[in-house]
Structure formats: C-alpha cells, structure tokens
Amino acid sequence: MSDTYRLVIARHATAASRAGSPDRERPLSAHGEREAAAAGAWLAASSVLPDQVMCSTALRTRETWDLIAKELPGDRPVSYEPAIYDNDVEELLELVRGTDPGARTLLLVGHNPAVYQLVLVLTEDHEGRDGFPAGSLAIVELKVPWSEAGPGDGTLAAFWSPGQG
C-alpha cells in the first residue's frame, strides 16, 4: 500500500441567485448541476474514489456532493461539517488532520476562498494557478499522514474545472 494520502478538494458548483434567502440555502443552478455531474464523471473516469467525504452544510455543497456521488460506484461515509462553510483555511486543515488514518482518499466539498487557499497552503504551488472556479476539483497528494498535514506537505497531482471539459 502506498504511503500517499490523497485529498480531493472540491469547490461547490455554480449556485443559483436567491435574493432574500439566507446564503446557506442557495441551491445549485441548472448549470451548476451539470458541473457537479461532470466533476463526478471525471473522478470516476480517473479512478479517484474517496474513502471518506467531508461536506459543508450549505445546500449548494450538499447538492454538489449528491451529484458527484451519483457518478461514483458504491457508497462512502459523509460527514456534514459546519466549519467548512466558515471559509477558514486553518479550520479546514484541522478537519483534514482529524481524518481517520484508514482513509487514503478524502473528498472535501467546500467554498472559496478557503478551498483555494487550502490547495495553495498544502502545495505551496502558486505557479500557473489563477483561481478555483465553481465546480473545480484539485487532487493534492500528501506524503505525510492526515494528522501531520500542513504547509508544503502536498503536491498538486491534478486539477480539473468544468471549463476544460
């Protein structure tokens, strides 16, 4: 078994505009639904299957995960974490560090700016990266256990966004 841990960081797909509704209750737009399904299809085609999922409690992230999951074989445990919604990269790192060591691939579904900052902090790779569009996925390979994950401990193994097909 490889010593590599894989963290798949997903930004929720495009949300609908909901004037007058709380931000946490914004659903995906029809375009966002297609983005999320495409993200799941890309993960399945890449044979990147999470052992565990952490998802923000916001409606658009839960819908993103549900549509990704429909494209993946089997079921996986998912926990809905309010701290992911708060967009704090330090809290995200703490959640990652608390991942079950038996999980080799973790999928975290969250929001910008924290998900993009998490990729940058873990990889310390700012080259050629100009953002993290809605519906995007970054796969970060860690050479340390989850409990030790920190700045510079990862390598950006893959990046996918809906715009690249």
Image (cartoon, rainbow, N blue to C red):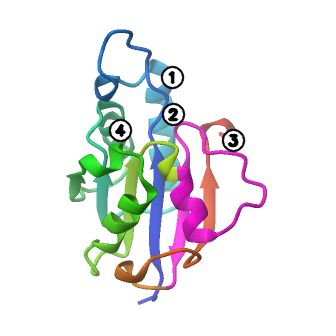
Judge whether residue 141 can be spotted in this image. Answer: yes
Magenta-tinted stretch = 116-143
Q: Position of residue 19 (x, y in %)?
A: 38, 9
Above or below, 133 relative to 23: below
**First in sequence: mark 4 or mark 3?**
4
Residue 122 within the magenta-colored segment of the rendering: yes
**First in sequence: mark 1 or mark 3?**
1
Q: Which mark is residue 103?
A: none
Which quarter of the rendering shows the C terminus? top right
Q: How far apart are the two marked residues, 3 and 2, measured between alpha carbons? A: 11 Å
Circle 1: element type = helix
Q: Residue at 35% of width from left, 45% of height from top?
A: 86
Q: Nearer the viewer, mark 1 or mark 4?
A: 4
**First in sequence: mark 3 or mark 2?**
2
Q: Which mark is residue 31?
A: 1
Circle 3: element type = helix
Q: What residue is pinned by disc 2? A: 35
